[in-house]
């Protein structure tokens, strides 16, 4: 149907399609069951369609249907108002536009603030709708939200929702959530000190941050008040004043000023910046010379101390808070307090002494100062062996090592040779003087020994090496049989076996005696009668071979002693 008039678009006669409307461009066809198929449906296809069937002289019959076409719109797009929106209690401002493009039929748009549905009320909310028909026949819907804005709306989230129908089914599409830029005057201002730790110290990075609660942020200016004088600081952008490697001169009261153009009002905030400091300590020296018995207050004298001198060190420093002092040597704590007293020093006191000053209120703030000390003494010989076992004719290498801060000479001597004839080599490094002597062992050298002498301007130290011949050690001959150690082992094993055999034999005899198998008579001869069933007799004769002195100890049955010749013969009847 075209404007209440019929227009033939396609027909079928004897299974052949005819009269096809060229406007459809091959999008029409009749199926075998006489259905009309329209491909790639467009919006213009939404019409009333009539189906007519003719049977010649029997006449015709027809019926009609309406085709409706719908299209989902594109995802809605938000266009926010450029710039900010002034907070007001009396005027509506445009918040944003929600645009739903190319849908059919026309969709509807609703607005939400923090998931709450906004409806037009003619007062603080106004919604304006516009429909635009595109050349394609599709419809674009545009909705504009106008409302009164308050300061609280700066945190609100807005979005719009498009409601449309697709093939008779109601559907929705949401836009992205957005916030608006609300302009409102400043009511409060603050000045905050941003630092790495609560206690600011020299060398820290510090930022003074001035913040007012208005939007847009006002213009900020900084001034500094120190000792009653106000000093203008350069213009600061963003309300931040930064210090890199802050020092004590940056301490003072800082004032931040903000001028709000919306209400033409100035706001002020102050903060007190105090920078803690600690100076490098100084060390005062006093020495008491043992030889001169007088005090000297000269730092350079610490390099010319002698054993027995006394040293008194005093450490002093200035800081912004109470200080603690301690003394260290080679990283180890040796004393606490400002003074370090070293009386009757020895060469072991040589080294660097460090005064470390800390501020307990600020653990990571400390300073230190070191002072070297050199104590001169006679050379200190390293521990050496007194007695050496040698072999005549062998080459002997001896080492003599001495510690001394002063220039030191190491020499060797014997009774028969002078130091010039003894070939040695001396190496000095880090106040350690080492000399190595190579010499062949002779009889004269065995008698005299060798002396090592280390001498400096203060005195000398000497050590004597005594020499003795190394005892000869006989080497075992493995070709002739087992070693002496092995022979001893064999003898020990044999003795142990014999003892065990004797012990076993004694135990057996004792057991037989307890059982009555070995009775003893007074006559020295005893018979044990066999049972009558056994006629054969076996007699064993045991003769005593005791020595005379042993025989005198034998006794008779009544306790009388019997001579060796009167022991008689003993017989044991083994018939049983």
Image: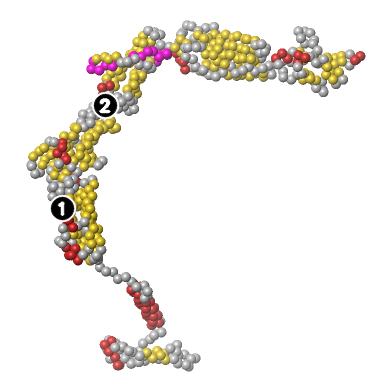
Category of crowding for the residue at label 1, using alpha-carbon neighbours closer than 10 angstroms: few (below 14), some (14–19), many (at least 20): some
Q: Would residue 60 be seen by someone viewing this image from the given angle?
A: yes
Q: Residue furthest right?
A: 57
**From this viewpoint, is residue 492 visible?**
no
Please tell me which residue is depicted at 79% across the width and 11% down the height of the picture. 7
Q: Nearer the viewer, residue 486 or 88?
A: 486
> Which quadrant would the N terminus be assigned to in this image?
top right
Locate residue 212, reporting x and y percent.
Answer: 38, 15
The crowd level at tag 2 (other Cα within 10 Å; few <14, some 14-19, many 20+) is many
Q: Quadrant of residue 483?
A: bottom left
Mark 1 element type:
strand
Question: Quick one: label 1 or label 2, which is nearer the N terminus?
Answer: 2
List the residue tagged with mark 1. Answer: 461
Q: Which residue is label 2 attached to?
A: 276
Residue beneath the point at 14% across and 46% down: 307
Q: Nearer the viewer, residue 226 or 399?
A: 399
Give the quadrant of residue 546: bottom left
Give yes or no for residue 225 being in the magenta stretch.
Answer: yes
So how many labels did they put on this image? 2
Can you give x and y, in whole percent of width and height, for residue 231 in the image?
Answer: 27, 15
Residue 353: image location, x then y, percent: 21, 39
Question: What's the coloring here?
Answer: secondary structure
Q: Nearer the viewer, residue 147 or 10?
A: 10
* Residue at 16 percent of width and 63 percent of height: 448
Placement of the C terminus among the 4 image quadrants: bottom left
Q: Range of the magenta residues?
A: 213-228
Asked if residue 391 is positioned above or below residue 6 in the image, the reply reads below
The image quadrant of residue 516 is: bottom left
Q: Secondary structure at mark 2?
A: loop
Q: Position of residue 326 (x, y in %)?
A: 22, 37
């Amino acid at each position: 149907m075209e404007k209440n008039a019929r227009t033939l678009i396609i027909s079928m006669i004897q299974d052949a399609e005819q009269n096809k409307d060229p406007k459809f461009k091959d999008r029409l066809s009749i199926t075998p069951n006489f259905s009309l198929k329209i491909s790639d449906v467009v919006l213009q296809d939404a019409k009333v369609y009539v189906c007519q069937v003719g049977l010649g002289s029997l006449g015709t019959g027809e019926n009609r249907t309406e085709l409706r076409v719908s299209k989902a719109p594109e995802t809605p797009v938000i266009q926010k108002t450029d710039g900010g929106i002034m907070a007001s209690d009396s005027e509506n401002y445009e918040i944003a536009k929600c645009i739903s493009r190319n849908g059919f039929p026309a969709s509807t748009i609703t607005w939400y603030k923090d998931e709450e549905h906004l409806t037009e009320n003619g007062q603080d909310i106004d919604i304006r709708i516009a429909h635009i028909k595109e050349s394609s026949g599709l419809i674009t819907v545009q909705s504009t939200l106008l409302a009164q804005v308050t300061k609280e709306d700066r945190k609100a989230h807005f979005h719009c929702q498009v409601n449309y129908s697709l093939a008779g089914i109601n559907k929705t599409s949401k836009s992205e959530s957005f916030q608006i830029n609300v302009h409102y005057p400043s009511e409060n201002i603050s000045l905050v000190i941003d630092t790495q730790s609560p206690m600011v110290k020299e060398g820290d990075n510090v930022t003074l941050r001035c913040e007012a609660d208005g939007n847009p942020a006002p213009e900020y200016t900084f001034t500094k008040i120190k000792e009653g004088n106000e000093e203008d600081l350069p213009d600061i952008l963003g309300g931040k004043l930064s210090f890199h490697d802050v020092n004590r001169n940056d301490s003072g009261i800082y004032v931040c000023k903000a001028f709000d153009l919306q209400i033409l009002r100035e706001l002020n905030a102050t903060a007190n910046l105090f920078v803690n400091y600690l100076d490098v300590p100084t060390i005062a020296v006093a020495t008491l010379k043992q030889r001169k018995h007088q005090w000297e207050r000269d730092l350079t004298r610490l390099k010319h101390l002698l054993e027995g001198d006394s040293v008194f060190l005093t450490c002093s420093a200035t800081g912004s808070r109470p200080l603690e002092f301690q003394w260290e040597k080679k990283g180890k704590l040796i004393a606490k307090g400002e003074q370090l007293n070293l009386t009757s020093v020895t060469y072991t006191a040589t080294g660097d002494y460090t005064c470390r000053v800390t501020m307990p209120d600020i653990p990571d703030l400390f300073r230190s100062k070191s002072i070297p000390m050199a104590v001169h003494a006679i050379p200190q010989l390293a521990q050496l062996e007194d007695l050496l076992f040698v072999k005549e004719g062998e080459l002997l290498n001896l080492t003599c090592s001495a510690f001394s801060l002063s220039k030191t000479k190491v020499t060797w001597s014997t009774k028969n040779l002078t130091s010039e004839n003894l070939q040695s080599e001396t190496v000095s490094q880090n106040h350690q003087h080492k000399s190595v002597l190579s010499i062949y062992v002779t009889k004269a050298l065995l008698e005299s020994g060798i002396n090592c002498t280390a001498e400096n301007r203060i005195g000398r130290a000497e050590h004597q090496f005594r020499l003795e011949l190394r005892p000869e050690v006989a080497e075992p001959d493995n070709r002739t049989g087992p070693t002496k150690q092995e022979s001893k082992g064999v003898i020990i094993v044999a003795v142990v076996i014999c003892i065990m055999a004797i012990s076993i034999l004694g135990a057996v005899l004792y057991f037989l005696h307890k059982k009555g198998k070995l009775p003893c008579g007074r006559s020295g001869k005893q018979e044990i009668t066999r049972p009558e069933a056994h006629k054969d007799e076996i007699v064993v004769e045991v003769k005593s071979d005791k020595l005379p002195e042993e025989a005198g100890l034998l006794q008779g049955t009544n306790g009388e002693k019997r001579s060796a010749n009167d022991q008689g013969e003993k017989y044991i009847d083994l018939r049983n």
